[in-house]
Amino acid sequence: MKLNQKLTLYFALSKLIIIALFVLLLPTLFDWYSVYTIDKFLKIQRERVFKNIKDNGLEFYLEGADSYGSYTMLKEDYISIQPIQPDALIEQKEIDDQIRVIGQDTAEYRILRNVFTEKGNYYLLEIGRSQQTIDLYSSLLRQVGLFLLIVLCVIASIMDFYYSRRLLKPFWAIINERLIKQRFPFNLHFAPIKTNTADFILLDHALQTLMENINKAFSREREFTANASHELLTPINILQNKIENIIVEEGLSEKQLAKLGEMSHTLERLRRIVRALLFLARIESRQYAQKDTVMLKELVLEICDELRPMLEEKDIQLAIHMTTHHIKNTNRELIFHLFYNIINNAIRYNVVGGKINIYDRQLNDLYHVCIEDTGKGIPPEHIPHLFSRFSHDHGSGRYGLGLSIVKSIADLFDIHIDVASQQNKGTTITMTFKKKPSF
Amino acid sequence: MKILLVEDEDAISEEIVHFLTLHQYTCQTVSTKSAALSILMDKCYDFILLDLGLPDGNGLDILKAVKDNYPDTMVIILSAKGDIQDRIDGLDMGADDYLPKPFSLAELHARIQAIVRIKFNTNGNTMKVGNFEINLQTRGISCDGKQISLYKKEFDILSYLVLNKNRPLSRTQLYEYVWGDLSLSDGDSNYIDVHIKNIRKKLAPYGNVEWLQSVRGIGYKVHLDT
């Protein structure tokens, strides 16, 4: 999962958790809070009643009667003062919920009770507020609270989303410019990514240094290859030219000529090895441009045309069934070399009057080319070592460097080579063109 | 034809000069960049064989000077620096050919001939061998006016042998000539034998092909009495 998706997911989840927690705690919290405010309100009312009594005497309320009672129109609040026995209310709470009948209606009230004395008589003061009002109040609070929370969460999420995008923009620029767009050898002519985040500046700088170092190591290797080839090939050149000049001299005996031929042959072998090693080094240091588009069918036909005399010599039947599939971003010379080697081997190790079948197919979205021969086959124990350098068929040097060059070319272009062989029946080489990883 | 050889390895110069003199070329050698530049100040050559890795600098500088002052002079780069970019640079700067070291003298001779052929567009450039006439320009071989058809590689092998007449060429030399850079497959000598067999088979109905000889222990040669 990409960082962007992860962050968005996290922002959404964290907000959801906060809302869920809030919804879970909300009823208890608001109930507690509304009770607390109501109690406070009741106490304030009590103070006012006592102040009135103090200023104007109890008669202000009683007006000559034994007791006093009053309630609002909808019976949300009531107040009463009545005489009482001094010990009637011992061990009762100051404020609690009780049911009262006010007028003709029975309702639950939160009631504050207070006993006081006036001229030696005990009175009970009750101030109540209906529970219904309290619930109404509490649920209103709850709704407003939830609404506000959701609005805030949405705003916060949007801000998170956009800020994180803005913050990570240089990071994606680094990924895109430095990692995805770059192909070896790296192009180092680039401006630093614009950012004021220290970590990203460090990352960008580190990547740049890394690429510079790789390029340096690469050019060092290239220089070494050039120097080594010069050092090795020049003496070979001298010897070879000397033999060439001696060979045409008059008066050489046939025996001397044969000896010179042997020397020349040995020298050619040495030269071939050095050249093959250099060729391998060049492929592996990616000195070949990958810009050609090749139609494999045409290429295979061209190779088979070049090898026709060999096919005729061995009386081999050749069948080519290929589509017009094109391979893009490749190097024609190297692909030619790859197929030439494999087809050449199919002829070389074939039997007289044998067959070669070349066909392609599209399987699971991947392109395959198969080259089937009816040759003597490869012993199973040799297949794993077929492509390694200097592997030998019991010292005969049969495989040499040819197939390791094939392997290097295949690796360069992400081609997988599969070898299936049955002794005395034939070999099938399957080349699978893997897709280059892309974002 | 006058040739200037710029090569710092004396042993190589010696052999090249010996070989080219044998083929009627006039040859002069220098071994440094400065010597090459100073000799080019007052002398003109038809051909320059140029090594790139010189002790006092890059041979490409000489190439530039030559192309600026004597645009008609033909240049073949001889280099052991196998770098592909080197080759592209050299050809871009106007070199007529690029021959990677180690090269065989027979190949050098063939390349010089090919460039001369292109440069002067000599249409009548036919070589006689036995009763046969080979035209390198049209890539045709005929006998008493009758055209004989050969495969491309067969013609390449035959013309290379004729061009280096009386010189035995090894199978590897022939193989490398016809395949160039791709001639890395080991021990493909049978390829040449098959082609030679086919050439003989195709030419035999028209005339004597005894001039196409096998040389024991080496390879093949075209034997012509001079």
Image (cartoon, coloured by chain):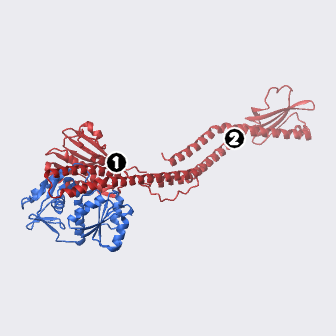
Chain colours: A red, B blue
What chain is tagged by disc 2? A
Question: What amino acid does circle 2 point to?
Answer: Ser
Marks 2, 1: nearer the viewer: 1
Badge 1 crowding class, 10 Å Cα cut-off, few under 14, some 14 to 19, many 20 or more, is some
- Asked which secondary structure carries label 1, the reply is helix
Residue A113 horizontal/vertical position (percent): 81, 33
**In this figure, which residue is indicated by the disc labeled 1?**
A411
Task: Tell me which corner region of the image, top left, top right, bottom left or bottom right, holds residue B155.
Answer: bottom left
Residue A114 horizontal/vertical position (percent): 83, 33
Q: Are marks 2 and 1 in contact (CB under 8 Å)?
A: no
**In this figure, which residue is indicated by the disc labeled 2?**
A138
Badge 2 crowding class, 10 Å Cα cut-off, few under 14, some 14 to 19, many 20 or more, is some
Residue A425 at least partly seen? yes
Q: Answer left or right for B25 relative to A211.
A: left
Vertical position of residue B5 compared to residue A253: above or below? below
Q: Answer left or right for A195 relative to B87.
A: right
> Is residue B131 or residue A242 the one in the foreground?
A242
> Is residue B64 or residue A335 the one in the foreground?
B64
Question: Which residue corresponds to the image point at 40% horizontal and 52% vertical from the top-left?
Answer: A221
Residue A362 at least partly seen? no
Question: Which residue corresponds to the image point at 36% horizontal and 64% vertical from the top-left?
Answer: B32
Q: Residue furthest right?
A: A119
What chain is tagged by disc 1? A
> Is residue A51 or residue B201 the one in the foreground?
B201
